[in-house]
Amino acid sequence: MGISTEIYHLQELPRYVTEKPYTMRYEPEAPLPSTNVVREKKLVKISNMRNHEESYQLHKNGFKISKLATNMTYQDYDSHKMITDVYLNELEGVLCNLFPRSEVDFVTYLVGLTR
C-alpha cells in the first residue's frame, strides 16, 4: 500500500553524458548560467518502508536503510556545533563501514526546516 504523488527528477538529457549537472548558490558572471539543471515532474508511488528495511540494498536499489546509534537528542539537531562535532562523526563511521577504504569528507550540510 502507498500513496501517489508528484516529485521532480532531473530530466535525462544528452548533455549530462559529458556535462555534470550543477546549481550555483550565487549569480555567476555572464555568460555562465547559475544552473544547467532541467527538471521534470514525475508521478511516483510512495510506500512505507518500515519493517522492510532489509529489502533495500545498495547494489540493487542505489540506496540502503541503516540504523544510526546516535548520542544526539532531538534538540541537538538545532545546534551547528552538535551536528558537526557529534552527528557528522557518527555518520562518517557508518559510511566508512559501508565503503571500506574510502575517505568521507562532509563539505556542507543542510538542515531542513519544517513548519
Image: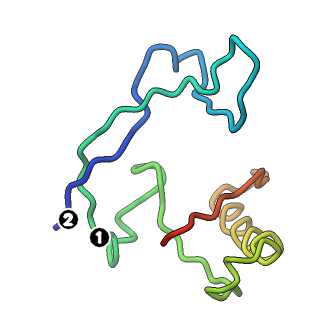
Residue 91 pos. (x, y %): 69, 68
- Drawn side of residue 50 relative to residue 65, left or right: left
Q: Which of marks 1 and 2 is nearer the N terminus?
A: 2
Which residue lies at the image location 68% right of the left edge and 16% below the top edge? 32
The residue to which callout 2 is attached is 2
Q: Position of residue 2 (x, y in %)?
A: 20, 65
**Tally of numbered discs:** 2
Question: Disc 2 on helix, strand or loop?
Answer: strand
Along the line of sight, the residue nearer the viewer: 86 or 29: 29
Secondary structure of the residue carrying numbered label 1: loop
Label 2 neighbour load within 10 Å: few <14, some 14-19, many 20+: few
Which quarter of the figure has residue 29? top right
Label 1 with label 2: CB-CB less than 8 Å: yes
Instruction: Specify whether 40 is left or right of 57.
Output: left
Would residue 64 appear left or right of 82 to someone viewing this image?
Answer: left
Q: What residue type is labelled 2?
A: Gly
Q: Residues within 10 Å of mark 1 (few under 14, many from 20)?
A: few
Q: Depth check: 54 or 40 in front?
A: 40
Residue holding disc 1: 48
